[in-house]
Every structure is written in C-alpha cells, then in structure tokens.
Image (spheres, rainbow, N blue to C red):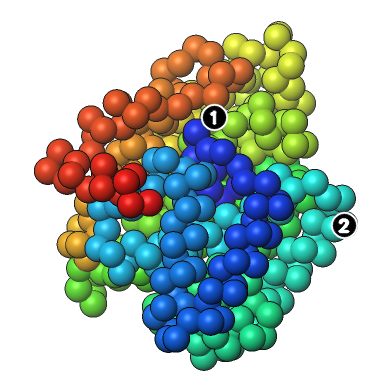
C-alpha cells in the first residue's frame, strides 16, 4: 500500500494481461530505439499512462513539474505501481506473489548495475524497472530505499497488526511511503545544498501523512484483504480488541479511531508544509499541490460520520480550488496530449 499508488481514489486497475502487453510492445520499441533518450521517451510515455490510469490526483499535481522532473516522477510511479499490483490485484497464490516480488527485486539489482536502459533491457529487466533504475543511478538515490519498499510489499503478503503508531511508521510506513518520498526528493532537489536534510524531513512527514490518510479511508478494503493498519493501542482505548467493520456495534468506536488517525495525519501535513521551502523552487508548486489535494481528502475523512463504510474522495471541482489558478492552462493540455 504505497502512498503514490493508493491515493488514486478514482483509479481503474489495469489487468495483468494489459500490463504484459504494454511491457512487450514498449520493450520492442525501446530495444529498436536509435538512442538512449529515444528509448527513455518510449518508456516514459507508457509510465505516464500508468499514472493517469491509476491516480487522477497525482497525475494532475505532477503536471506542475518541469518536463524532465515530471518524466522521472512518472518512472518512479510505474516502478512502485507494479509491485503493488502483484500483491493487491493479480490473481495468484501467496507463494506465487512472493515469487514474483522476489523476481522483481532481483531484476532491480540487475537494473541498477546496468549502465543504460538498453543494457538493462538486454539483461531481462522490465521496461518500467529499467527506466526507474536509470533514475536511481542519475539522481544517486540510495539503492537500499527501493529494497525497503519491496520489503513493505512482502509484508502485505503476510500482514501483522501494529501495536502503536510508532510501530506502524517504523515497521511499515517507512518502506511503503517514506522511502517513496525520498525517491521524489532526490528528483525534486533542494533549494540549496544545505537544505537537503530539511527536504527529506518534509518528504518523510508528507509520506506518513498520506499513508495515514489512506489507512483511514481504506479500512473496509484492507479488512477484505486480511490487513489492519489501525494501531492496536488506539483500538484498545476505544474498547476494541479485534476490529471488525462488519460489526455495527463497533462503528461509532471505529469512526472515533479514524478521526484520531485523520488528526494525526493533519499534524504531519503541517510539519511537511513547514519545510516545503527546502525544495527547489521549480518543484514546490507540485509538492504543495499534492499536499493540499490530499489534505483536502484527509479533512473530509475526519469530518465525515460515514467514513468507515464509505470510501471518501474529493470531487474534481474541489481539487481545482486548491490548485494554483495561474497554472490551470497545463491541465487541459495534459489531458489532450496524455
């Protein structure tokens, strides 16, 4: 449940067959490309289609990035999207899902060792992972961050409850969301050399906030998958020993837990915003748009009396209200050109 993936509140999942077809066609184009940049462009066009299909909100806010940074973010998105599909969507046994994740992890190691997209593809690395590996090399993203992300995906195949918020953050959110924020920070860049640590801190806080918002919104869906991301200590304070969204007698107590989680998330949004000036100026509009759009969603969850059984979303008109009006012109063009 990584935050750049699950925040697609109006997402439409691709079938496994479509993923495979896109991989085959894009690989063929990239291998026939006359240059590294042409191969990159072929893959990024498809990575953009992935983001657009799965998350309207994230697609919109990334339109406010400069083209090169936007393309790198699209590469990152596709590389975190696919493993999440393995554990959440594709029809396979747990053993097969784990085998696929482990295979994907091994191919990542091949990708980061390659010197180009072509070399990665020739080593058998999938297209989206080949493009992401290039971003890792060029942006000097620590290779262990993506390993931590894949560990979080493995956790979803054998989930356990979390005793406290700290346990949840350190044992799961770190891999599922914080390191994704770190990927993006290396691409966004700092406002100056001495600001990078503050930019990472802002990304960490935003990752935590986004993931807590997701958890508060998706309790019913997570339960269907055998997962629980609500800290046990918060549940026990409400007299709940075993959470069950299908038990009407728990609804009031569970809604109070969701409101508390939303409140904690709001605190992390505020902390992230306090350090947003640490990012490069050409990235701040997109980061602020992301923060504001999902903060909107978080507020709706916190205020709604029916969040437990109703998956909250933010209508497009409401999203536009928090986006920079001076840059609206980018949105119709983005939807026309894809």
State the residue at coordinates (65%, 59%). 21
For marks 1 and 2, the one nearer the N-term is 2
Q: Which callout, 1 or 2, points to the residue nearer the camera?
A: 2
Q: Which mark is residue 217?
A: 1
Q: Nearer the viewer, residue 82 or 247?
A: 82
State the residue at coordinates (52%, 91%). 115
Can residue 125 be seen from the camera position used here? yes
Task: Please indicate whether residue 20 sits to the left or right of residue 91 in the image.
Answer: left
- SS state under label 1: helix
Q: Nearer the viewer, residue 155 or 31?
A: 31
In the rendered view, would you say 100 is above or below 308?
Answer: below
Q: Position of residue 226 (x, y in %)?
A: 77, 36
Q: Which mark is residue 95?
A: 2
State the residue at coordinates (53%, 82%). 32
In the rendered view, would you say 249 is above or below 168?
Answer: above
Task: Please indicate whether residue 123 sits to the left or right of residue 217 in the image.
Answer: right
Label 2 crowd bin: few (<14), some (14–19), many (20+), radius 10 Å? few
Q: Position of residue 212 (x, y in %)?
A: 51, 39
Q: Position of residue 276 (x, y in %)?
A: 25, 54
Q: Nearer the viewer, residue 137 or 41?
A: 41
């Amino acid at each position: 449940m990584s935050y750049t993936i699950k925040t697609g509140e109006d997402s439409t999942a691709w079938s496994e067959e479509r993923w495979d077809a896109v991989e085959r066609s894009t690989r063929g184009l990239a291998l026939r490309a006359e240059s590294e940049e042409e191969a990159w462009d072929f893959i990024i066009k498809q990575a953009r289609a992935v983001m657009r299909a799965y998350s309207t909100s994230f697609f919109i806010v990334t339109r406010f990035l400069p083209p090169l940074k936007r393309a790198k973010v699209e590469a990152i998105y596709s590389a975190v999207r696919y493993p999440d599909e393995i554990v959440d969507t594709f029809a396979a046994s747990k053993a097969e899902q784990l085998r696929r994740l482990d295979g994907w992890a091994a191919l990542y190691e091949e990708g980061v060792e390659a010197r180009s997209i072509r070399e990665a593809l020739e080593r058998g690395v999938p297209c989206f992972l080949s493009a992401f590996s290039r971003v890792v090399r060029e942006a000097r993203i620590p290779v262990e961050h993506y390993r931590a992300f894949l560990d979080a995906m493995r956790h979803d195949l054998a989930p356990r409850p979390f005793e406290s918020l700290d346990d949840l953050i350190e044992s799961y959110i770190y891999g599922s969301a914080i390191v994704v924020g770190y990927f993006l920070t290396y691409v966004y860049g700092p406002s100056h050399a001495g600001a990078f640590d503050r930019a990472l801190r802002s990304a960490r806080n935003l990752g935590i906030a986004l993931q807590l918002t997701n958890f508060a919104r998706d309790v019913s869906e997570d339960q269907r998958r055998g997962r629980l991301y609500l800290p046990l200590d918060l549940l026990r304070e409400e007299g709940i020993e075993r959470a069950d969204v299908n038990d009407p007698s728990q609804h009031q107590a569970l809604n109070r837990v969701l409101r508390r989680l939303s409140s904690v998330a709001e605190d992390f949004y505020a902390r992230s915003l306090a350090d947003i000036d640490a990012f490069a100026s050409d990235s701040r509009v997109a980061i602020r748009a992301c923060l504001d759009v999902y903060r909107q969603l978080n507020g709706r969850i916190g205020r709604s009396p029916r969040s437990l059984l109703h998956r909250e979303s933010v209508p497009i008109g409401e999203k536009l209200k928090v986006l920079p009006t001076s840059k609206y012109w980018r949105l119709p063009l983005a939807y026309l050109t894809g």
